[in-house]
Image (cartoon, rainbow, N blue to C red):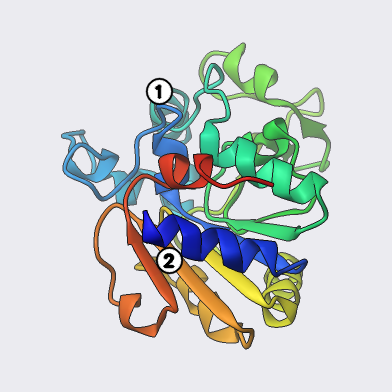
């Protein structure tokens, strides 16, 4: 496969790679995405998922928010797949400098990646909206209804909901890493979710690679565009 040879050569010749990943990285671990035909946005609920996953809905219908969140957003049994594992290998080898992810499942860290910028937060961090105390994922899973702190405050997942801004520190760190990279690999993302997708414009390096199951509007900007499974493609790469 010529595209594997091309990708391998790019990786061999670089010690400053940054990976940007979307929902397609996690679907191969059994976590559903949002926008595909089998995704969350195409399923029927009492309210549209975009409404349920909004800051105002969290405030006004907190119990219903958590009912949906526990059923559709948390996958504690999910395990890292071939993509996560290969990226962790590249990290350990000193080639991959950072992972920038739109996912909230923590699978990159579970696989062993050290520098991970989570644009949309993580299900593994939860905090009291009154006193700021943090709680792990098990606390959310093991408490029915609305999880509350000892101080009486409501606990909120540290994930970015609709109507909420992204963490500017994380954004700046991601921009810094992307702008310094000489190889930029985007995987499992249609690059349709903003403002996260805007980050690709900060890349000024040599090689831009895009791996996705379907075409994207950014394919024309790439040095190498591969249509396929991100895990399958990366599994052919040697470190």
Query: Which residue is found at the position 67% from the left and 75% from the top?
Result: 178
> In this rendering, does residue 157 appear at all?
no
Q: Quick check: 68 left or right of 97?
A: left
In this rendering, the answer to whether 145 lies above or below 97 is above
Which residue is nearer to you in this view: 212 or 106?
212
Q: Residue at x 70, y 75 (%)?
A: 181
Q: Position of residue 150 (x, y in %)?
A: 80, 22
**Residue 157: horizontal and vertical position, in percent?**
62, 39
Task: Name the secondary structure under disc 2.
Answer: strand
Q: Which residue is mark 1?
A: 71
Q: CA distance from mark 1 to mark 2?
A: 31 Å
Dot label at residue 162: none
Q: Does 207 sit left or right of 111 as displayed? A: left
Rendered residue at 63%/72% (across/down): 183
Relative to residue 198, is residue 23 depicted above or below? above
Q: How many marks?
A: 2
Marks 1 and 2, the one that precedes in the sequence: 1
Quarter of the rendering containing residue 167: bottom right
Q: Tell whether label 2 touches label 1 (CB within 8 Å).
A: no
Residue 70 appears in the rendering: yes
């Amino acid at each position: 496969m010529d595209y594997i040879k091309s990708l391998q050569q790019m990786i061999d010749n670089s010690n400053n790679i940054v990976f940007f990943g979307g929902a397609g990285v996690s679907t191969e671990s059994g976590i559903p995405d949002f926008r595909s035909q089998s995704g969350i946005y195409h399923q029927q609920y009492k309210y549209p998922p975009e409404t349920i996953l909004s800051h105002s809905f969290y405030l006004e219908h907190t119990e219903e928010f958590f009912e949906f969140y526990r059923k559709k957003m948390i996958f504690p049994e999910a395990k890292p797949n071939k993509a996560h594992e290969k990226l962790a290998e590249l990290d350990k080898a000193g080639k991959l400098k950072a992972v920038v992810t739109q996912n909230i499942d923590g699978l990159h860290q579970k696989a062993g990646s050290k520098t991970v910028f989570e644009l949309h937060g993580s299900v593994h961090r939860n905090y009291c909206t009154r006193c700021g105390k943090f709680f792990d994922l098990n606390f959310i899973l093991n408490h029915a209804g609305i999880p509350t702190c000892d101080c009486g405050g409501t606990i909120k997942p540290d994930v970015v909901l609709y109507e909420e801004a992204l963490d500017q520190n994380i954004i700046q760190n991601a921009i810094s890493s992307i702008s310094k990279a000489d190889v930029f690999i985007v995987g499992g993302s249609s690059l349709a979710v903003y403002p996260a997708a805007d980050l690709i414009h900060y890349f000024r390096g040599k090689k831009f690679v895009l791996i996705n199951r379907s075409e994207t509007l950014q394919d024309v900007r790439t040095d190498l565009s591969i249509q396929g499974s991100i895990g399958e493609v990366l599994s052919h790469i040697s470190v």
